[in-house]
Amino acid sequence: MNKIIEIRNVSAGYGKKVVLRDINLDVFQDDFLGIIGPNGGGKTTLLKLILNLLSPMEGEIRFYVKEQKVPKVRIGYLPQMNQIDKKFPVSVKEVVASGLSFEKPRFRSFTPEQEERIEEVLLQMGLEDLSGRAIGELSGGQLHRVLLGRSIVSNPQVLILDEPNSYVDKRFESHFYQLLEEINQRSAIILVSHDMGTVLTLVKNIACVNETLHYHAGSNISEEWLGETYACPIELVGHGHLPHRVLKKHEY
């Protein structure tokens, strides 16, 4: 199994405050990694490290393509919904196309191949009839598809989803998860979520971030492992096909 991201003995933080300490993690080419952890545990800091928005205090992050070390890999990023300005005057197609902007020379048009790729993604996301519409006119589920399209139009080697449940309404939920399965055939996926049910039903492996990182191969995790890694007691309660997390009474 080919490794695409390798994190070794990484510590990181802001100023003198250490948020992550001695982190080790491997992400593989066909991985679907779920990242869980309490608020303030360092999940966002870990994403910033992978996205090269923050430099480690210690340790190293390496990227690989076909087992060869490279300076970087293509990463698609779907941010949290509260970071999106729906009032910005831009169309659906322009937002999707912006995922290719780093490949296009300034003041040049997209190539025919890039235009074809944009149209393919609009079709895949079911947005072909909305391509000229302003994003402020879209429903939450439609906007989600637009931003997901932007994040995959460049055929990224890694797709990062930050709290994707903040977008998904019930009408779009099953289609969204089906899309992720399709995308995972071509890209590794890193999904950050507070929704334990979503994580456990989708991912192949789990990492819990709470200053340090605890890795669990597979998604069949136990109540004991959750309690230890979250540093507070947790129960998993079955509810249909989706387990839920419940915090038992504790001091914090």
Image (cartoon, grey):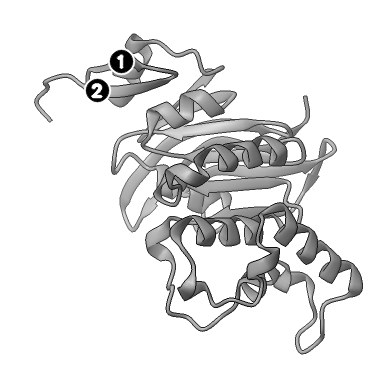
Callout 2–callout 1 Cβ contact below 8 Å:
yes
122 to the left or right of 209 = right
In this rendering, is residue 32 above or below 129?
A: above
Q: Quadrant of residue 185?
A: top right
Give the quadrant of the N terminus.
top right
Q: Quadrant of residue 247?
A: top left
Of tags 2 and 1, the one toward the viewer is 1
Residue marked by disc 2: 246
203 to the left or right of 136 = right
**Amino acid identity at mark 1:** Val
- Give the mark nearest the N terminus, 2 or 1: 1
Give the quadrant of the C terminus.
top left
Alpha carbon separation for disc pair 2 and 1: 7 Å
Q: Residue at x 83, y 71 (%)?
A: 115
Residue marked by disc 1: 237
As rendered, which of 130 and 136 lies closer to the eye? 130
Dot 1 surroundings within 10 Å: few (below 14), some, or many (20 or more)?
few
Q: Residue farthest to the right? A: 112
Q: Number of callouts in the render? A: 2
**Amino acid identity at mark 2:** Val
